[in-house]
Image (cartoon, grey):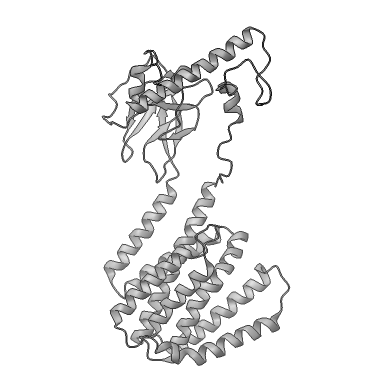
């Protein structure tokens, strides 16, 4: 009741301001200015009227609009990184079981590094190529890494295998949270991502018996978490469609290698990736509107309630902003169809009666239409007091 009383008082004060503005214009008074050092024939609470306020209102100043193709490419980057992590874990499983020899790991590591390095230097790099510095850096990392591998491999050898696997999975999840996917966000942290990814690799290589295999897995983890974001960002900036191609390539490889551990796990992983692809493919659903027209509805993760506007393809997500009743006119709600929860169609004919009763929902709001072609709402309880006189303020 207190909230309704405050809303009625706000509507009453807004009406007083509009009446004062109308009377001032009728009497030929000068235009209101937003200053305090000059006396003006307007109430102290007057702010220029609704038109001035709405014209000066700035909405969504820092909003960034993405196209559907950009959203698909960004999602495939994340899914590609997940598939690469799965392939890394499968490489560890095969190396631990002895299905992959040390020579195969070393040769595959050498070929991968050389091909990616040449492609980056000749096609993606924008600075001057300095092979001397690159060779020096590679030799330093290789010598120190291979020399310290026996020490690193025995750091966690006394810990149980189940604990090692659990800590490795938790470190990998932490690395995914802070990984750089090409989007500038506060949560992105390159040092945390690389450190947690290397921690996961250090936990895993303690189960290996060969120092060469441990060094190869450690090098693969370092390349995956340290150099792959730079390579991937440059590649996808020049060829955005390559993210989709690489994702589809790893989409086939990761479930196939997961069958070595468990066929059910492989099916579950494939279904999860398939669900993500279906969500990306569902750009929207076409909903018919009275008069033979149609509108494209949008869906968000925040709310499944869709309010479709009858002006072409404009859609408003529930709940829209509030608006005074004096500047709106009611529009009947028509139950259209079920989309997961509920979707309500707005009829463009005020005199049209609903073909079906609206769903019973205490949170359902009445829809009103303004002269500025905006869909606005007002609580259902407010309409009971639309003609009631305002109560006097308490002292």
Residue 248 in view: no
Vertical comparison of 221 with 26: above or below: below
Question: How far across and how far down the image is residue 220, in percent?
Answer: 49, 79
User: Is 115 left or right of 187, judged from the image as shown?
Assistant: right
- Residue furthest to the top in view is 27
**Is residue 186 at all visible to an observer of this figure?**
yes
Horizontal placement of 236 versus 192: left or right?
A: right
Q: Which corner quadrant of the image does residue 30 belong to?
A: top right
Quarter of the image where one finds residue 57: top right
Quarter placement of the N terminus: top left
Instruction: Tell me the residue at 29%/26% (across/down).
Output: 358
Viewer-proximal residue among 150 and 306: 150
Instruction: Say which quarter of the image contains residue 264.
Output: bottom left
Find residue 382 and report its horizontal and vertical position in percent: 36, 22
Image height of 211 relative to 63, above or below = below
Residue drawn where x is 39% and y is 44% of the image: 302
Spot occupied by residue 83 in the image (x, y as percentages of width and height): 43, 67
Residue at 44% in and 32% down: 320
Q: Nearer the viewer, residue 291 or 328?
A: 328
């Amino acid at each position: 009741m207190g909230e309704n009383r405050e809303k009625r008082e706000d509507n009453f004060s807004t009406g007083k301001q509009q009446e004062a503005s109308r009377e001032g214009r009728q009497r030929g008074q000068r235009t209101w200015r937003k200053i305090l050092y000059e006396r003006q024939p307007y109430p102290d609470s007057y702010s220029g009227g609704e038109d001035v306020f709405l014209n000066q209102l700035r909405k969504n100043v820092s909003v960034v609009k993405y196209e559907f193709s950009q959203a698909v490419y960004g999602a495939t980057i994340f899914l590609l990184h997940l598939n690469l992590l799965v392939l890394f874990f499968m490489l560890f499983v095969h190396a631990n079981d002895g299905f992959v020899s040390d020579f195969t790991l070393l040769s595959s590591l050498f070929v991968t590094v050389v091909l990616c390095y040449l492609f980056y230097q000749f096609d993606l790099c924008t600075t001057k190529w300095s092979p001397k510095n690159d060779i020096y850096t590679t030799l330093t990392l290789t010598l120190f890494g291979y020399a310290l591998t026996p020490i690193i491999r025995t750091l966690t050898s006394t810990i149980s295998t189940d604990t090692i696997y659990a800590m490795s999975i938790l470190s990998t999840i932490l690395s995914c949270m802070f990984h750089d996917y090409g989007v500038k966000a506060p949560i992105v942290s390159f040092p945390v991502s690389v450190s947690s990814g290397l921690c996961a690799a250090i936990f895993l290589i303690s189960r290996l018996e060969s120092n060469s295999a441990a060094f190869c897995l450690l090098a693969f983890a370092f390349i995956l978490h340290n150099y792959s974001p730079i390579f991937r960002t440059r590649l996808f900036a020049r060829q955005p469609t390559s993210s989709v191609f690489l994702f589809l390539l790893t989409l086939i490889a990761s479930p196939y290698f997961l069958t070595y551990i468990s066929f059910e796990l492989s099916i579950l992983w494939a279904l999860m990736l398939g669900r993500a692809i279906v969500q990306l493919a569902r750009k929207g659903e076409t909903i018919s509107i009275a008069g033979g027209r149609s509108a494209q509805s949008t869906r968000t993760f925040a709310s499944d309630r869709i309010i479709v506007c009858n002006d072409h393809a404009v859609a408003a997500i529930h709940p829209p902003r509030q608006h005074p009743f004096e500047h709106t006119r009611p529009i009947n709600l028509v139950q259209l169809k079920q989309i997961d929860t509920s979707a309500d169609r707005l009829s463009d004919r005020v005199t049209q009666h609903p073909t079906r009763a609206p769903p019973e929902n205490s949170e359902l709001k009445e829809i009103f239409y303004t002269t500025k072609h905006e869909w606005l709402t007002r609580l259902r309880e407010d309409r009971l007091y639309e003609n009631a006189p305002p109560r006097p303020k308490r002292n």
